[in-house]
Image (cartoon, rainbow, N blue to C red):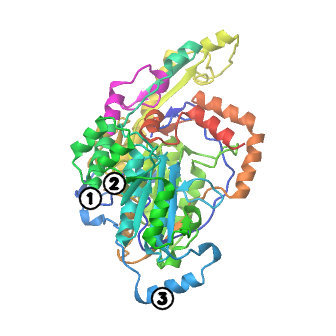
């Protein structure tokens, strides 16, 4: 079968609770080779009303006619702005009887939920931040738990403030915006939030400037020099070793495959990357200048001066003071009334994550909303090699979708997507199940850093799509190809003979030669067919004409803001806005509490981690086989976004595919 590469924060409502419905355990797996790609907004009311156009069916599929909500062909459906509530956080002090209940809860709290009165919550925000809920055995940071900690700390009378260590973030702008939104929400409580930044670039400063105060040591590394996009190309390397990539792409902006097939960046890809970079940079200048009370041009001039001296940052008012960590702690002791000789009471992120929301007086509701998380690259079935638990396994995801659809206790569902895509068949199967779920109850898509190509494929099956202003989305296009290894085989003295039956039997089997003309034509036609299916289903799902969808497809990646203005996204905001929209569509009053039920599998437990180590040692041979399969495009149709752009714009974990596989494998040993 040919392989088509079809390319591609959570804000919790102040009165929601999270619990785990079930844990889908499975051995970890090694992600297959992928040419993958990888931003934010405050929850604000959409100023536009969207008009969904009547249209004939965008593609023939008898099976869809009975299960999918159809648009009345005789009228235009206008979706008013009021249908999309903001879901904004509003801090309400706990008083009266509720205050008494909170004191009782804390009096009888379990040992791991006990926190000293006047404690400072400390969180070290650095490295990768997962969109999945993590267990206590899982390393790294979890965005849902970070955000919930901010909400709990705002209401917890034992917490006097928050002290953030921010450095070296390795996540997209969508997650950064979600955390920034929670910092601003937390400040409504009147408690302090200060940041300490030993190393700082644009992303770290974007987060820190939302805090009341920013401190840095004298030797801090500051490099606020601007943003860049880089694209690497392997065609010259492949030519030198005798490998010829044969790539067919549909969509002039579809850059997946360019890394292999081109030596330089295409005009279309350059145009797209430039537009994305301009959006990110403009947003950064606007938010930073607003936070620091300066003119946008002043911040831009400062960036262009190439300032790296910390004292200069203090002079310009971009940081509060130049002091060491121990001096910040001494300052906080004075602020909280702790005697000099005493230790400042502190509770860290991991321990505080175990405190339940009800303990601090945040009630839950009887109405349940399911949260189904979909993070990472998309595969149809689980790999035989249990090396990594990351990624979206379609058959397991579909099980969760069906369990929610069959359950009468859920009033609505939210699909939380953070994915650059993957297997196109898997994406289509999940799209179908999401459409069926949406026919039975409200389903809302909430996008994190990226929901492009296969990730967007999933989102377009929902009734409304909510994205951050700089989420990367769209990328509706395809690319197909294979490697011709003939010259390489000659160099190393290898020979391969193929005996076949059937005109096209050797399309992928004969990697020792290039395509014949008829094979190349078949490849091109199959790519065109896959693209039309993707585009037409997008048109159907978004209630657009095919011609209108063609204007915004062509493999182009959009930011959330641009996608919203072109009808690919309904509202700008985080998970809190998605929850508010879900409540609205489920006829749940906005002021009524709901309970969020996590359906997605949490990160691996300790036994799973130990089992994964043994499996990875046994599966070394299979690991190498999968690496070679990925290199030869032999895993079927793919729906992915280009990894070059994803890596450089977002600093995401979806980096060079070969290095990612090696890294995942070695890290599991």
Mark 2–mark 3 distance (CA, rounded to whole Å): 37 Å
- Name the quarter where the N terminus is drawn: top right
Residue at image point 47% right, 58% down? 327
**Image quadrant in which you'd find residue 238:** top right
- Name the quarter where the C terminus is drawn: top right
Mark 1–mark 2 distance (CA, rounded to whole Å): 12 Å
Pointer 1 residue: 46
Mark 1, mark 2: which one is toward the viewer? Answer: 2
Mark 2, mark 3: which one is toward the viewer? Answer: 3
Q: Is residue 335 magenta?
A: no
Task: Give the extent of the magenta segment.
Answer: 249-276
Q: From the viewer's perspective, is residue 259 above or below residue 241?
A: below
Secondary element under disc 2, as helix, strand or loop, is loop
Is 665 left, or right, of 172 in this rendering?
right
Q: Which disc number belongs to residue 41? A: 2
> Counting residues from the N terminus, which is met first, the one under dot 3 or under dot 1?
1
Return the residue found at the far front: 341
Q: Where residue 501 sits: x, y (%)?
A: 65, 22
Q: Where residue 512 sits: x, y (%)?
A: 62, 16
> Counting residues from the N terminus, which is met first, the one under dot 2 or under dot 3?
2
């Amino acid at each position: 079968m040919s392989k088509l590469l079809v390319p591609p924060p959570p804000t919790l409502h102040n009165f929601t609770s999270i619990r785990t419905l079930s844990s889908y355990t499975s051995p970890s797996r090694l992600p297959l080779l992928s040419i993958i790609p990888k931003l934010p907004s405050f929850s604000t009311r959409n100023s536009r009303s969207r008009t969904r156009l009547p249209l004939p069916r965008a593609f023939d599929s008898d099976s869809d006619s009975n299960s999918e909500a159809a648009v009345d062909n005789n009228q235009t459906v206008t979706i008013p702005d009021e249908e999309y509530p903001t879901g904004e956080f509003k801090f309400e002090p706990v008083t009266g009887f509720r205050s008494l209940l909170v004191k009782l809860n804390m009096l009888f709290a379990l040992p791991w939920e006990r926190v000293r009165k006047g404690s400072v919550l400390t969180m070290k925000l650095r490295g990768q931040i997962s969109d999945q809920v993590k267990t206590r055995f899982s390393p790294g940071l979890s965005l849902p738990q970070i955000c919930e900690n901010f909400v709990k700390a705002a209401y917890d009378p034992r917490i006097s403030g928050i002290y953030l260590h921010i450095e070296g973030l390795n996540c997209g702008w969508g997650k950064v915006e979600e955390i920034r939104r929670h910092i601003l929400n937390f400040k409504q409580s009147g408690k302090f939030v200060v940041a300490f930044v030993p190393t700082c670039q644009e992303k770290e400063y974007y987060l820190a400037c939302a805090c009341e105060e920013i401190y840095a040591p004298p030797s801090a590394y500051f490099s606020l020099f601007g943003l860049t996009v880089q694209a690497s190309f392997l065609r010259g390397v492949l030519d030198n070793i005798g490998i010829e990539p044969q790539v067919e792409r549909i969509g002039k902006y579809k850059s997946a495959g360019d890394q292999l097939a081109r030596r330089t960046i295409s005009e279309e890809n350059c145009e797209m990357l430039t537009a994305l970079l301009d959006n990110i940079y403009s947003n950064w200048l606007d938010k930073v200048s607003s936070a620091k009370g300066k003119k946008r041009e002043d911040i831009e001039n400062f960036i262009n001066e190439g300032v790296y001296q910390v004292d200069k940052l203090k002079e310009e008012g971009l940081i509060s003071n130049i002091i060491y960590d121990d001096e910040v702690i001494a300052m906080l002791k004075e602020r909280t009334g702790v005697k000099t000789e005493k230790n400042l009471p502190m509770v860290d992120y991991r321990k505080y994550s175990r405190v339940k929301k009800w303990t601090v007086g945040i009630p839950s509701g009887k109405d349940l909303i399911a949260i189904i998380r979909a993070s990472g690259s998309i595969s149809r079935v689980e790999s035989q090699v249990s090396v990594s638990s990351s990624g979206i396994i379609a058959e397991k995801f579909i099980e969760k979708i069906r369990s929610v659809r069959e359950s009468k206790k859920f009033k609505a569902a939210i699909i939380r997507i953070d994915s650059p895509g993957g297997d196109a068949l898997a994406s289509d199967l999940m799209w179908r199940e999401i459409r069926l779920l949406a026919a039975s109850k409200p389903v809302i898509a909430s996008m994190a850093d990226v929901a492009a190509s296969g990730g967007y494929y999933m989102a377009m099956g929902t009734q409304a799509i909510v994205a951050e202003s700089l989420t990367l989305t769209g990328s509706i296009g395809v690319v197909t190809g294979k490697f011709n290894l003939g010259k390489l085989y000659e160099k190393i003295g290898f020979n391969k003979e193929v005996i076949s039956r059937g005109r096209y039997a050797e399309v992928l089997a004969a990697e020792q030669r290039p395509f014949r003309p008829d094979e190349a034509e078949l490849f091109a036609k199959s790519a065109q067919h896959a693209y039309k299916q993707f585009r037409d289903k997008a048109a159907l799902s978004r209630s657009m004409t095919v011609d209108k969808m063609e204007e915004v497809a062509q493999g182009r990646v959009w930011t959330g803001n641009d996608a919203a203005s072109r009808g690919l996204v309904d509202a700008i905001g985080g998970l809190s806005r998605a929850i508010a929209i879900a409540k609205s569509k489920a006829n749940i009053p906005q002021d009524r509490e709901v309970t969020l039920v996590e359906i997605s599998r949490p990160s691996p437990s300790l036994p799973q981690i130990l089992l994964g180590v043994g499996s990875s040692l046994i599966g070394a041979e299979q690991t190498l086989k999968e690496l070679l399969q990925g290199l030869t495009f032999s895993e079927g149709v793919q729906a992915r976004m280009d990894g070059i752009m994803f890596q450089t714009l977002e600093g995401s974990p979806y980096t060079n595919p070969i290095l990612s596989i090696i890294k995942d494998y070695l890290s599991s040993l």
